[in-house]
Image (cartoon, helix red, strand yellow):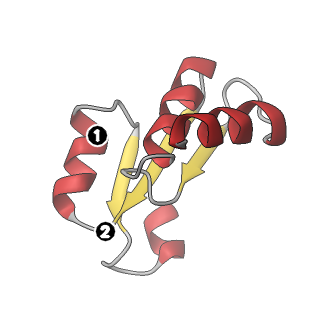
Amino acid sequence: MPGAAAYMGWNEICSRKRGETVYVSSAAGGVGHLVGQFAKMMGCYVVGSASTNEKVDLLKTKLGFDDAFNYKEGDLRSNLE
């Protein structure tokens, strides 16, 4: 069901526009990585957070996120600046 949750959340609930910056929490998870892909297809700048540096690397190198960070390192505000 992660695909349905990601699709409905992105297309039915989220009001997004091309070129906006999208932050995806738990971006390496079942729903998060799909939301990131939908956002990239829409033309958004996508930033994701994950719990390990390996997952951060996956987001940046394999899943095409524009940026990603380990939420266990530093605080959210400084990571998003």
Contact (Cβ within 8 Å) of mark 1 with mark 2: no
Residue closest to the eye, 54 or 74: 54
Helix, strand or loop under label 2: loop
User: In terms of image quadrants, where is residue 8?
Assistant: top right
Query: Could one spot residue 8 in this view of the protein?
Result: yes
Which amino acid type is marked by label 2? Ser
Instruction: Judge left or right: residue 71 versus residue 11.
Output: left
Which amino acid type is marked by label 1? Lys
- The label shown at residue 60 is 1
Residue 2 in the image: state x and y as whole percent. 52, 43
Q: Is residue 49 above or below residue 36?
A: below
Q: Residue at x 31, y 68 (%)?
A: 51
User: For mark 2, what is the residue?
Assistant: 51
Q: Residue at x 63, y 43 (%)?
A: 5
User: In terms of image quadrants, where is residue 41?
Assistant: top right
Query: Could one spot residue 81 in this view of the protein?
Result: no
Q: Mark 1 or mark 2: which comes first in sequence?
A: 2
Q: Residue at x 57, y 27 (%)?
A: 38
Residue 80 in the image: state x and y as whole percent. 51, 62
